[in-house]
Amino acid sequence: MNFRTLQELASLCQARGLGIGPLMLEEQAAESGRDARLEFAKMADYYAVMKDAVQRGLHEDTTSRSGLTGLDAQRVMAYRGMSDPALGADASLAMAYALAVSEVNASMGRIIATPTAGSCGIIPGVFVSCQQRFGWSDEHMTYGLFAAGAIGYVIANNSFVSGAEGGCQAEVGSAIGMAAGALTELRGGTPAQAVHAVGLALKNSLGLICDPVGGLVEIPCIVRNGFGAVTALAAADMALAGVRSVIPSDEVIQVMLEVGSAMPEKHRETAGGGLAQTPTGRRIMSELKGK
């Protein structure tokens, strides 16, 4: 790739007169040596899997094998039909879709790791709900996935996307940043605005630990995907309104690296601390071991 930082990415977009998505498609094709049409078709297939996961999460039994989680997306959808959500119809739909995909993952269904399985619901939750809301084409959404991929590439090469390395800030936080930046571009924002959205999103998730109860990607992972989708919408709206990340987004990524590196091992996907070691968390762990 011809960029290593978000600033370099934005500058390259400006120099070539391209958005982040189209530029990333060119870069990916050049790096892989494959025709850009083939790369685009592959990404379009990934988006189809995401949409399918949303529907499966809304209409099928997503009870996990542990029995700890499942069907919360359907509960949120039922609530939306009977009440007036405080979040409003659009944000609550993104939340429900994110929960749906994360529950499909927990029940051993097919998902796309974006950037990890533990954060797989955030981008689909944002993308699929916004596609329905704004009437966007699958082609438009596929370019959005390339934009998200470019952002994820920068984060992964300068910090973490793994909870085992940097805590949940690295998984859910990165996914929120990817979704926020991509959504900003999908809604007509400039590459510079998209980069600001990334920084705004990441600043709101710094220090988030990875503390899976029972060592499973279920509690609190699934609900964090729901919250993450809502945060991504907020960050994109801020950026589109002209709100800037006063601390440059590349510097925020470096802070995420610093915080993750300093994080105790027990707070990095070991189930050795946080929610996993509450009395209830320990009881659940004991019950799982006894099964």
Image (cartoon, rainbow, N blue to C red):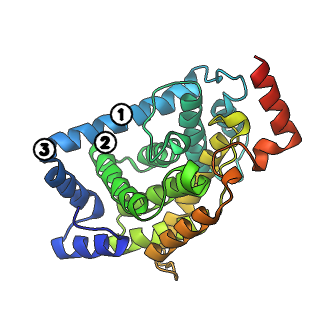
Q: Which mark is residue 138?
A: 2
Q: Which residue shows up at 36% across the image and 70% down it?
A: 6
212 or 14: which is nearer to us? 212
- Amino acid type of the residue that numbered disc 1 sits on in the rendered structure: Ala
In primary-sequence order, the first of circles 3 and 1 is 3
In primary-sequence order, the first of circles 3 and 2 is 3
- Amino acid type of the residue that numbered disc 3 sits on in the rendered structure: Arg
Name the element at disc 2: helix
The residue singled out by tag 1 in the image is: 48
Name the element at disc 3: loop
Q: Are marks 1 and 2 in contact (CB under 8 Å)?
A: yes
Q: Which residue shows up at 88% across the image and 40% down it?
A: 279
Residue 255 shows up from this direction: yes
**Residue 114's spot in the image, x, y percent?**
44, 45
The residue singled out by tag 3 in the image is: 34
Distance between the alpha carbons at the discs numbered 3 and 2: 21 Å
Distance between the alpha carbons at the discs numbered 3 and 1: 21 Å
**Residue 95's spot in the image, x, y percent?**
60, 45
Residue 208 versus residue 289 in the image, above or below: below
